[in-house]
């Protein structure tokens, strides 16, 4: 069950990232702290250049600490470079919300599987005990 779940979750991660990993372009970026009037504090922004224009994207991720001038990489789609994302395992591939939801879903599926198989009816137990495997021959008689 866990293997199937990991395959499904991995496929979900690979196919739902925005900007798209397969179609996206990577570019080097530098972290600069910029005052955000809406948040009323300084936030890290990843500044990068596409060759035509300079862009800055939000680089805030839970449990991620940036230093001024730190080098990183961004992933962007050429049609919408302003919607770029910092390319890192934590933040691009996995976010804290998806990780929590994933663990909760795995635990719920496990509990469902346990509750379904925990107390079989006496008839089901008897059916299982009555099943006898036939001896199979290596070659068929013709």
Image: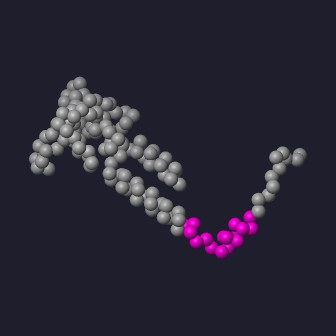
Describe residue 75's horizontal placement relative to residue 11 as left or right.
Answer: left
The quarter of the displayed image where residue 84 is located: top left
Residue 122 is covered by the magenta coloring: yes
Is residue 64 shown left or right of residue 99? left
Observer able to see residue 55: no
Q: Is residue 137 above or below residue 121?
A: above
Residue 62 left/right relative to 1: left
* Residue 142 seen in the current view: yes
Task: Decide if residue 103 is on the left or right side of residue 49.
Answer: right
Q: Nearer the viewer, residue 12 or 33?
A: 33
Badge count = 0
Q: Position of residue 64 (x, y in %)?
A: 26, 45
The colour scheme applied to this rendered structure is one colour
Looking at the image, which residue is at 82% across and 46% down?
138
Which secondary structure class fits the magenta region best? helix
Q: Is residue 83 above or below residue 133?
A: above
List the single residue furthest toward the bottom. 122
Q: Position of residue 72 (x, y in %)?
A: 26, 34
Tell which residue pokes out farthest to the right in this image.
Answer: 142
Image point (22%, 41%), residue name: 66
Residue 93 screen position, x and y as percent? 36, 43
Q: Report the residue at 76% width, 62% height from top.
A: 132
The image quadrant of residue 104 is bottom left
* Magenta span contains residue 129: yes
Q: Is residue 107 above or below residue 21?
A: below
Image: magenta residue range: 116-131
Q: Residue at x 36, y 52 (%)?
A: 98
């Amino acid at each position: 069950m866990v293997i199937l779940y990991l395959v499904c979750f991995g496929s979900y991660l690979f196919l739902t990232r925005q900007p798209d990993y397969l179609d996206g372009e990577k570019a080097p970026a530098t972290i600069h702290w910029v005052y955000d009037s809406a948040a009323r504090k300084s936030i890290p922004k990843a500044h990068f250049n596409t060759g035509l224009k300079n862009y800055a994207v939000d680089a805030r991720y839970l449990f991620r600490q940036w230093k001024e001038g730190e080098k990183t990489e961004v992933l962007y789609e050429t049609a919408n470079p302003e919607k770029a994302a910092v390319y890192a395992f934590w933040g691009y591939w996995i976010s804290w919300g998806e990780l929590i939801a994933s663990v909760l879903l795995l635990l719920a599926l496990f509990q469902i599987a346990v509750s379904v198989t925990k107390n079989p009816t006496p008839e089901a137990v008897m059916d299982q005990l009555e099943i006898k495997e036939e001896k199979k021959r290596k070659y068929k008689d013709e």
